[in-house]
Image (cartoon, rainbow, N blue to C red):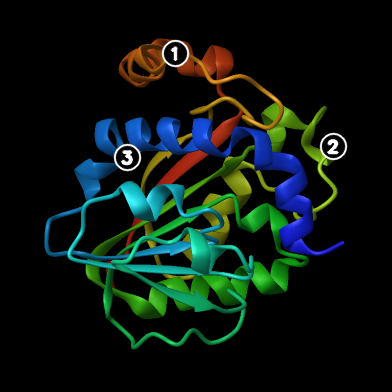
């Protein structure tokens, strides 16, 4: 089964809802890490919900989903490329790499290690890497319900891999967002904004981890 077919089946009925939720997430949470002149790479961009909504000087999207090219905004440069192979971007050319829902789709720890090495290579000194994805410690009962999940990671194992790759981990939120929007109705957007402000509820509902790291060497 192709990536395109899998995601069309999973998200086709929720695409517009996801776009609206990501508009809130970028504006009210992730934008704080991105300056107006920054170069941003959305790794595993998929439907481009993040990169289309973030405000940045230069925007890149990378992934293997064939729909990414058609979903990307006119200001986004798209690379159809395997994240575990040498990237077509120069060293030290990116200010923020945002990796969302990609690591669980890698087929081996070797692929993860290669991907993190590329993140370290393309990031400018002192700039930011953000990883968002399912935390196996809190979603082990539903993690394998998706046919394209291969690599189970916890906040602790991903932190170790990120540090081994040469990045300094600055913030770890083991429980951030709920597990998935697949097959679910859109929550009222004011509730999404409220959820982002009420950090004390994240440990109750969160099954996805958020890790923020810096290229310090």
Instruction: Tell which of 13 and 166 is nearer to you.
Output: 13
* Residue at horizontal 80 percent and vertical 53 percent from the top: 148
* Residue at horizontal 72 percent and vertical 60 percent from the top: 4
| Residue 191 in sight in this render | yes
Dot 1: what SS? loop
Instruction: Tell which of 22 and 113 is nearer to you.
Output: 22
* Residue at horizontal 72 percent and vertical 29 percent from the top: 139
Residue underneath mark 1 = 188
Q: Give percent across and percent down for residue 6.
A: 78, 52
Image height of 138 relative to 126, above or below = above
Mark 2 or 1: the one toward you: 1
Q: Quadrant of the C terminus?
A: bottom left
| First of labels 3, 1 by sequence position | 3
Residue extending farthest left: 36
Residue underneath mark 2 = 145
| Residue 152 in sight in this render | no
Report if the CB atoms under discs 2 and 3 are less than 8 Å apart. Answer: no
Q: Give percent across and percent down for residue 54.
A: 28, 49
**C-alpha gap between disc 3 and disc 1:** 16 Å
Residue underneath mark 3 = 26
Report if the CB atoms under discs 3 and 1 are less than 8 Å apart. Answer: no
């Amino acid at each position: 089964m192709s990536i395109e077919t899998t995601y069309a089946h999973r998200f086709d009925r929720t695409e517009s809802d996801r776009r609206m939720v990501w508009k809130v997430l970028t504006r009210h949470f992730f934008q704080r890490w991105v300056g107006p002149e920054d170069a941003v790479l959305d790794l595993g961009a998929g439907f481009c919900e993040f990169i289309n909504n973030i405000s940045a000087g230069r925007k890149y999207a990378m992934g293997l989903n064939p729909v990414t090219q058609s979903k990307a905004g006119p200001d986004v440069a798209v690379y159809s490329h395997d994240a575990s192979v040498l990237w077509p971007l120069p060293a030290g050319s990116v200010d923020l790499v945002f990796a969302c829902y990609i690591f669980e789709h890698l087929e081996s720890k070797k692929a993860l290690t290669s991907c993190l090495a590329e993140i370290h290579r393309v990031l400018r000194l002192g700039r930011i890497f953000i990883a968002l994805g399912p935390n196996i410690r809190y979603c082990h009962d539903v993690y394998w319900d998706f046919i394209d999940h291969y690599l189970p990671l916890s906040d602790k194992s991903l932190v170790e891999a990120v540090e081994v790759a040469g990045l300094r981990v600055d913030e770890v939120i083991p429980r951030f967002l709920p597990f998935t929007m697949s097959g679910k109705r859109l929550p009222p957007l004011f509730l999404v904004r409220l959820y982002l402000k009420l950090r004390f509820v994240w440990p109750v509902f969160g099954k996805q981890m958020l890790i923020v790291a810096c290229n310090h060497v």
